[in-house]
Structure formats: C-alpha cells, structure tokens
Image: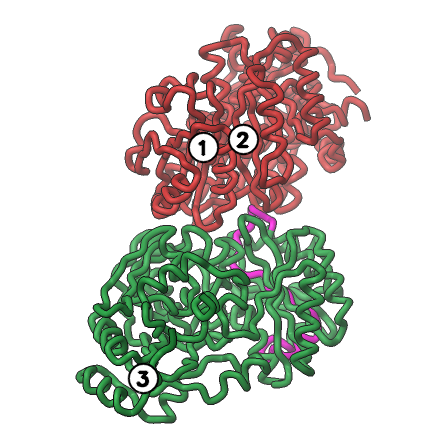
Chain colours: A green, B red
Amino acid sequence: MTTTPVNTMNLDALIAELVGLEIITDPTQVAKLSQDYYNFSPVLQPQLAGKKGDLVVRAAGEAEVLRVAAACVKFRVPLTVRGAGTGNYGQCVPLNGGVILDLSSMQAIRWVKPGLACVEPGVKLANLDKKTREIGWEIRMAPSTYRTATIGGFIAGGSGGIGSITYGQLRDRGNLLAVRVVTMEDEPRVIELRGDEVQKVNHAYGVNGIITELEIPLGPAYPWAEWVVSFPDFMTAARFGQTLADSDGIIKKLISIHAWPVPTYFAALRSCIPEGSHCALLMVAESCLESLADLVKEYGGTVCQQKTAQEASHGMPLGEFSWNHTTLHARSVDPSLTYLQTLFPDDKNLKLVEHIYHHFADELMMHLEFFRVGGVARPAALQLVRYTTEARLNEIIAYHEAQGAFIFNPHTYILEDGGMKTINVEQLKFKEMVDPYGLLNPGKMRAWLER
Amino acid sequence: MTTTPVNTMNLDALIAELVGLEIITDPTQVAKLSQDYYNFSPVLQPQLAGKKGDLVVRAAGEAEVLRVAAACVKFRVPLTVRGAGTGNYGQCVPLNGGVILDLSSMQAIRWVKPGLACVEPGVKLANLDKKTREIGWEIRMAPSTYRTATIGGFIAGGSGGIGSITYGQLRDRGNLLAVRVVTMEDEPRVIELRGDEVQKVNHAYGVNGIITELEIPLGPAYPWAEWVVSFPDFMTAARFGQTLADSDGIIKKLISIHAWPVPTYFAALRSCIPEGSHCALLMVAESCLESLADLVKEYGGTVCQQKTAQEASHGMPLGEFSWNHTTLHARSVDPSLTYLQTLFPDDKNLKLVEHIYHHFADELMMHLEFFRVGGVARPAALQLVRYTTEARLNEIIAYHEAQGAFIFNPHTYILEDGGMKTINVEQLKFKEMVDPYGLLNPGKMRAWLER
C-alpha cells in the first residue's frame, strides 16, 4: 500500500478543510519544521537533506488533532507528528511530504499528584519539571535536550537519558502509564492505552497513532548536586562509574564518563579539567555527597568542580554535556565527528569497554553513560567517531557487534534498524488498525513496508 | 588476654561507682535483658541458655555511657550493649556475665532533614519513621522487627531487610553516614566516625565501641500499598519476584516469596491464600500499582489481598510476615522448625533456587527475600528447616555451599562465622585501640580470640 502523492489540488482542499487552525505554509518555516538533528550523522545527511512537508499545522488540542487526522485521511495525505524536533535519526523528518503536525503548542499540564502527572504532548520537559517540583516530584528521566524537548517527542522518539541510572528506560514497565492516541481511520477516534498496552505506541516515531495526552510516573525531586571528577586513567574513571552505578546506597541521576580528549570539547568545563585527564560528570543527591567523596577517594579521583543543587540551578546544567549533548559540543568544534550508540555487556570488569577503548585508539573517543537495563547497571557508549567513510563506519559497527557489544545504530531513520533490530508485531498490528492507509510518518517502519 | 572474672567484690564496687544511674539487679529482669531471639536456633539454644549479665545499667545519655565504660574498665568488668534484643544470633547475649548496658532509653531524635537524620541508638525504628514521615521521608530499610527494634541494635547486629530491594544492605556505602562511639580505654572517650570509617563498627555486635549517636540516610516516603499475590507454581512465583526486583520502573520495598506450606503459618493471611498456593508478599508504591497488576497478569498470579497505604497503616503490617518474622510465625505453630540464611548466585533464571527447592523437598520450605547486592537484585532465602540434628543441619549447609549458594549461618554467635567468614582486620584494629582489655561483648569476635 502506498500513499497518494500529495498534489496541489488536494493540498488546497486540505487547507480549506482545516480553516481556523494555525497553518504554516511559508517554505522556509516549513523546511525548518521538517528537520531534526539528524545532521549528527553523515550517513543520514544526504538521505534526509531537502525532505520536507508541504505545510505545518500547529494543533491547539485534541479536537484539532482529530480534524487534522480526518482531513489527512480524506485526502490521503501523509502526516508526520513533531514536537521540538530534537531527535537525531530523522524521526520526525517527513519522507513523503504532506502535513507536519506540530504539537508543541499542546502544553497543558492536566494534573500533577504525588508520583504521577497527566500532560499534553507538547509540554517541554523542563517546564513540566518546574511544575511537578512544586509538590516535590520530578520527571524520572530526560534527554540532554531537557530544556527544549517535549514529553511527547521524548516518548515517541527517545529511549531514556538522565535519570535512567535509577529508573531504567522508557520502555520499562512503569515508566509510561497511559496515552491517548488519535487514529487515522476513516473516522478518526481517540483510543486510550493503559499499562502494558502503551508499548503499542511507545518509541514508535509516531507511525501508529498521534499521542494527544500522556500519563507519566514521577520520581522524588532530590536536590541534585553536580560534580566533575577527573582521573588520570580512563579505565579507572570507567570502573569508578560502574561502582557508583552499583552503589545502591548512593542516590544518583547521572554518571557520564569521558575519555580524553572529549573534555576539550566542553568549553565551559575545560578550564577545570586537567590536561590529559578523563572525567566523570555526576548528578548525585546532596544527602549522599559524603559517600560520593569516599568513593572518589577510593578510585583516586580529583573533584574538579562541585555545585550544590542551588548553584546548579543557574547556568548550564551539567546534563548538557552528557548523552548526545556531548556529540553536539564535539561537532560544534569539529563537524567531521559523528558518533555511535552502544550497549556494552553486563560485565562489572568492563573488559569489552577496555578492549574497544584501546582497539580503536584515536579513531574513537570513548564516552560512557551508565544506565539500568533490566535491573542491572551497564555502560552505554556514545563514542565520538572520527568519520571517514560510511564503509569504515559500518566496519566499526560490525567489529563492535562481533565482540558482543550491541549497537543502537543512529545512522538510520528506520525504526527497526536502530535499536529494535526485529519487527515489533504488536506495533505493526496496531498500525494496521489505526492507520490503514499508511499515512503516519510513512517510510519509517520496516515491518509496514515489508509486510 | 582474658577478662577478669566478675566477682561480688568488684560488682559491689562497680554499683557504687554508678550511683545515680538506673541499675537493675533483680535476677529475673537481668536474665530477661540478657536474652535475644537466638532460640530460633536449636544449635544456639544449649550454647546460650542461662547466659546472663550480673546487672543491667540503663543509660540515659552519652555522659552516662562514658561513666559506665569508665567503671567497667576500672574494675575490668565485661560490658555487653543491648537495644531491644530482637537479634537472632545471641548478638547481645553476654557470654561472661558483667554489665548489660541497655541503651533503649536513649531515644533522642537530634534532627531530621531531607534525606538525613541524626538519632540516639535507642530510638525504635517505627518511632523514627513516624517522625521522619512528617517531612516526607522514611528510614531506607528495616528488619521485620521494625516496630520494636532500635536503630542502634539494627546497625550493630543487623544487615538489611524491608527496603533492601531498593537500597541494598546496611554495609553498602551511603547507608550509614556517621556514628559516635564511646571507647573502653583507661580514659573512655567519644570518637566520631564518618563515611567509610563507620565500617569499623558497622555490624560488629558492639565488640569495638558503644554507639551513642548515629547519622543515617533517609529515603522518600512513598505511600506503600501491600499486596498478597498467589501462584499455582513456586518457581513462577520466584521468577515473578526476580522480574519485579529487576523492574526499574516499579518502586518497591518488599518482595517476599513463600512456597507452600509456608503460608499455612500466616494465621492472619491464611484465609486469603488458596490451599496449596505459593505466595508473594509485596510492598509497592501506590503510583506503580497499575504496572504491578500488569506484571502479576503476565505471570498468571492472583491478587488475594490488596491494601492501600492508608489501609495498611492499621493492623499487622505485611512486613511482619517477611524476613525473619516468617520464621517466628512458623515456629509459633511448630517450635521444632528452624531456618537458614542463604544468598543465591546472580542468576536471573534462578536455577540453583529451583534445584534446592526440589532437592530437599519437604525438609526445607522455601522462603525468598529479594534484595540488592552490589547493584544487582538477587534472592536471599530464609528457608524453614525441619530440624532433626545439628549434623544434618550442617549437611544441609554444606550441600548449599557446594552448589554455590552462600550461607549466612544463623546458628553461631561468632561474628565472623555468620556472614563475614573472614576476619575483618579493620574492625579488629579498631577493637585493639578502643577496647584494649577486651571487655566489650567478649567471646563474639574470632579475630580477637585468635589473634
């Protein structure tokens, strides 16, 4: 099944159908709102360059989303949902034009209670946090784009981040409680998915429903101190990270480990990190700092910078040097760099990390993020890669996989080819029901294309 | 070095020295205050029966503790510290008579702030919790004797319990922040140990210093719902427990799994658990119950009883059927029963649990408690044993060890022969400094006896 090509005729008719809604047709604006940060990938750059929607509709609420869905179905126009566009794999880049449905104006926070919040998808994570913190809670995890990313975009296109060292990943049971989705059936309707059912649309790039409301769990809002610790030896820094990750008595939110010369890309931190040193960027509950200091001492680390939670609330958050912000900073200095996303095996000795670190020497700059996978703290790597060719990049990926590391390939816009690898039957079945014409973000779901 | 035998002469002199303090000499009272719950062990029963102090001193504060310490040093009288006496290995049973120093009156809560509390050792855990909950916090972990045990006794004689599925064990860095201890030197003094230094006296049965104040970390006080879930198959119940333990998105405090016929010993729960069923006793944050219900469904469990946190605040807490309260209930029905304490290997498939469960059949009744060990959720077993002879008990222990399970032997009053196995050099060195005459709880520390 293919989507009807969007031609001028049905585009005009579509716009007429959507009278009263905020519609953007200015080509520059539409082009801008068709992009995300896929430019981190030299592989995706040529594939996605120039891809753009035909118009942007900025919906103000679920009723408007229903109207947009109905109009797109009526005229068989592709619809690609967008939040803040902070993804890195072209998740929200439309491959076949059509409507960009921008949900960033749907910012209602329906309610917040201890441990839970119900929100519209366009709420920015930082704004939600500000609200939930009023009653002592915070969002459990956030990407490094926390200040700009929307909750809907994070759920549909992300997987975890700062906070995942405690709460695991978005896909883990309990980290997304319910969603409302608008369908693309002949008569679009709203479906509520609760509990395990949410997996039908979780991390599905918006290919099988338009999320209009989310119920998410919250974590207690600790005052998070921010520390930068340096180590003369990379593997000592890495092992320090693993031990901190496994220290059940120390409450933490971020354990981000960077091999030299990664710290040279951190303009705002560089002066405090000694030349040639490897560093750990940490967010730890203030009440646990004495214990953290003991652990730093045990591993021979040097605390280069420490901020109380109060001090950390001003200026650039330490989290903005972690996860994929590391890549952002590195690429702002050297745009030829790219990155990988790797899950290392469950091995407290970090043998494969050590092997990879030495094996690729200068070609890869090691950057680890510790997070919990099925109850166990493991390192993910977002290694910086000195890119030469796509063939060489694939060689590097293949080498990792042959050694037993798992690559979440950030150089593909295909849902299954990233981290999923296999077809998600549940998501496919749901798409067959809610998007029979295949209009939602077409071209992203291999299962649909190849069924 | 041996302690001077306590004779009537120095006892009278000692009492004279302690004028003004609360002293108990009534033999029945003294005998009672020399006991703990070592009667769970048929091995310890004959070894500790009749052991008692010569008198009890109930200190009202650190200044009085210093006076008692000085007097005991002066007259070379053994001193054994006691809280509520809820231990199970004779931790506070005096082997050589002397003074029982009862700290249960030292109940001051010095301060409570977010994430931290500073208390005297005699504070009952439940009372401390009540106080910390006023500002939204609670103690991180507690034994099943939570309503009667003191914080000092828990630190000196315990290791973890309800809450350990999130925070690990007391010995984990960050779970005990500081202690003040009174020494037994010629001129007793107060030493403050902070951070890693606390390991010198942590879980040392009071052999190397008298704890007079503790600084402990707190956890956020979730409203804990209490669920009883039954399963037709034991290993399904066990695997459900492991999966819940590894579910980073579900906040929990207790995962206690009981093979049939253990539930028959739970008078207050028995009517709700189907005949022949195995059960899970759970404490989970109310905000996570929908996710828990999904997990129960996945494993084919049946929710037999559910209480909100509010409902659970009345009546017998579910925790009082877990950890060693399970043994208490079983022994109240059948006093011939005893138990073991076992740490199973880190194996998500629970193969050894399954083997042991089948291997001993009716001789052992399996009871698992999930907790975190070095960052990994693993099952501990407090198996109920149909006791025959000490030789057979030792055979059972040896079989477990040969198969790769670790036994924390509850049938010894020797510190190192329980869970520690090896000599703790740091604790020994500290004892050499603070208790040069070996007067503190003599006979419990192998390292001291054999040095």
CA separation in Å, label 1 and label 2 = 9 Å
| Mark 1 Cα shell of 10 Å, populated few (<14), some (14-19), many (≥20) | many
Asked if residue A48 is positioned above or below residue A224 in the image, the reply reads: below
Residue at left 68%, top 51%? A348
State the residue position of label 2: B154
CA separation in Å, label 1 and label 3 = 60 Å
State the residue position of label 3: A56
Do badges 1 and 2 share one subunit? yes
CA separation in Å, label 3 and label 2 = 63 Å
Q: What residue range appears in magenta?
A: A246-270
Could you tell me the amino acid type at mark 2? Phe
The N terminus of chain B appears in which quarter of the rendering?
Answer: top right
State the residue position of label 1: B125
| Mark 3 Cα shell of 10 Å, populated few (<14), some (14-19), many (≥20) | many
The reply to whether discs 1 and 3 touch (Cβ–Cβ < 8 Å) is no
Determine if the magenta segment contains residue A249: yes
Residue at left 56%, top 25%? B382
Q: Nearer the viewer, mark 3 or mark 2?
A: 3
| Mark 2 Cα shell of 10 Å, populated few (<14), some (14-19), many (≥20) | many
Question: What percent of the width, then of the height, locates residue A340?
Answer: 61, 71
Q: Classify mark 2: helix, strand or loop.
A: helix
The reply to whether discs 1 and 2 touch (Cβ–Cβ < 8 Å) is yes
Could you tell me the amino acid type at mark 3? Val
Asked if residue B124 is positioned above or below residue A76 in the image, the reply reads: above
Question: What percent of the width, then of the height, locates residue B26?
Answer: 51, 7
Judge left or right: residue B430 versus residue A422.
Answer: right
Determine if the magenta segment contains residue B345: no
